[in-house]
Amino acid sequence: LPAQDNSAFRRLGDWKAVDVSRQCPEMTVPVGEQYPEADFPEGEIQEYGGSNAFRTTSAEKRELERLQSYDYEKIRRAAECHRQVRRYVQSYARPGITMTDLCQRLERKTHELIAANGLECGWGFPTGCSLNWVAAHYTPNYGDNTVLQYDDVCKLDFGVQVGGRIVDSAFTIAFNEKYDSIIEASQAGTNTG
């Protein structure tokens, strides 16, 4: 995949080029077809520390972890779909788009990349695209003509589920530098734990 310039957004990094990708630039290949052996990327793994360090040294805990690999496969599939949809959304979310269009495109792409199948896999929950003073959980209804503006701050929250395991992540869409400090504070809080 080519690099993706996200400089239109405040405090949101660019997507680096991926020389060997299983996805096409149009982002149309379902995640399951990209990873037919279910060898989904593991992502960042955090080691247990302190009083929980025994979880990596205890044979019993390691065996329990191995038995949960069935769940991990579902979670990793959902996570890879979520990552790719996030990249896709950041390619078109710009001032002038209606919030309904933003959410519908995101949700269609989620269904396409996860290969939605009834209750087995699809959305984790309705997309939240809360603007300005609305903290969270706002979803536009059909006919809502609200348009994303340059001076808006939008909290975009969406989830992908596979086998009932939901992967959820949110990020902030802002174009005006006046939101930099609040975005930085939110990022710092998230990374602190």
Image: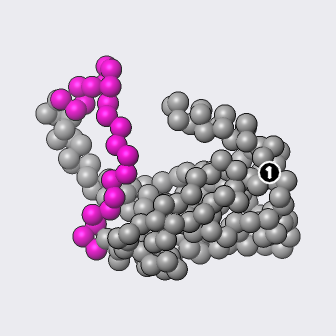
Write the residue at 28% across / 66% down.
38
- Magenta part of the protein: which range? 36-57
Q: In the rendered view, would you say 132 is above or below 190?
A: below
Residue 187 visible in rendering: yes
Residue 8 pos. (x, y %): 70, 60
> Is 139 on the left or on the right of 52, as rendered?
right
Q: Which of 69 and 147 is in front in this view?
A: 147
Q: Nearer the viewer, residue 14 or 38?
A: 14
Q: In the rendered view, would you say 116 is above or below 133?
A: below
**Amino acid tagged 1:** Asn
Q: Nearer the viewer, residue 72 or 39?
A: 39
Please, what is the dominant secondary structure of the magenta stretch?
loop
> Is 166 on the left or on the right of 77, as rendered?
right
Q: Does the magenta stretch include residue 56?
A: yes
Write the residue at 73% across / 42% down.
180
Tell me where residue 51 sits by quadrant: top left
Q: Is mark 1 on a helix, strand or loop?
A: loop
Write the residue at 37% across / 57% down.
76
Residue beneath label 1, please? 176
Q: In the rendered view, would you say 125 is above or below 108?
A: above
